């Protein structure tokens, strides 16, 4: 008989690679399709925690298939958003709302 044992700890942060990099002016963080989170190397500790909370939401969105991207566009639940037509950090974008909600807790 098979059964599953749930760990007594959160696995949310396991297997999440966080790297610090120069992301350019105005860019605080970025998440790649593989779940790697890049954080702007010039942020304060408080901002780092906010950005990680924000980017972890995008990581989950990639994992669930809700969010994807290519060189020309982002795709949210199958709808295409051309990069040239959107402001990438806009809180009103459907994938950004949940991410900002998570980061606003810090």
Image (cartoon, rainbow, N blue to C red):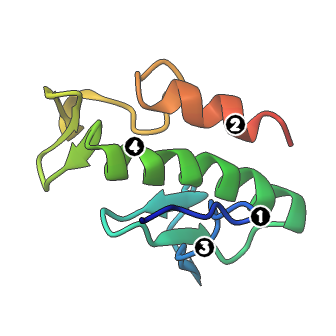
In the rendered image, which residue does mark 3 sit on? Answer: 14
**Mark toward the start of the polypeptide (4 vs 1):** 1
Outermost residue toward the top in this view: 92
In the rendered image, which residue does mark 2 sit on? Answer: 102
Q: Are marks 3 and 4 in contact (CB under 8 Å)?
A: no
Outermost residue toward the front in this view: 1
In the rendered image, which residue does mark 4 sit on? Answer: 61
Q: Position of residue 43 (x, y in %)?
A: 76, 67
Q: CA distance from mark 3 to mark 1?
A: 10 Å
- Judged from the image, the secondary structure of the residue bearing numbered disc 4 is helix
Q: Are marks 2 and 4 in contact (CB under 8 Å)?
A: no
Which residue shows up at 78% across the image and 63% down it? 8
In the rendered image, which residue does mark 1 sit on? Answer: 9
Which residue shows up at 54% across the image and 73% down it? 16
Q: Position of residue 57 (x, y in %)?
A: 54, 45
Image-quadrant location for residue 51: bottom right
């Amino acid at each position: 008989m098979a059964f599953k044992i749930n760990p007594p700890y959160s696995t949310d942060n396991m297997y999440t690679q966080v790297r610090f990099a120069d992301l350019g002016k105005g860019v605080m963080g970025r998440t790649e399709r593989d779940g790697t989170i890049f954080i702007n190397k010039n942020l304060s500790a408080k901002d780092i925690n906010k950005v990680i909370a924000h980017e972890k939401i995008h990581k989950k969105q990639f994992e669930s298939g809700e969010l994807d991207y290519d060189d020309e566009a982002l795709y949210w639940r199958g709808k295409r958003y051309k990069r040239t037509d959107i402001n990438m950090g806009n809180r009103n974008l459907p994938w950004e709302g949940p991410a900002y909600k998570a980061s606003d807790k810090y």
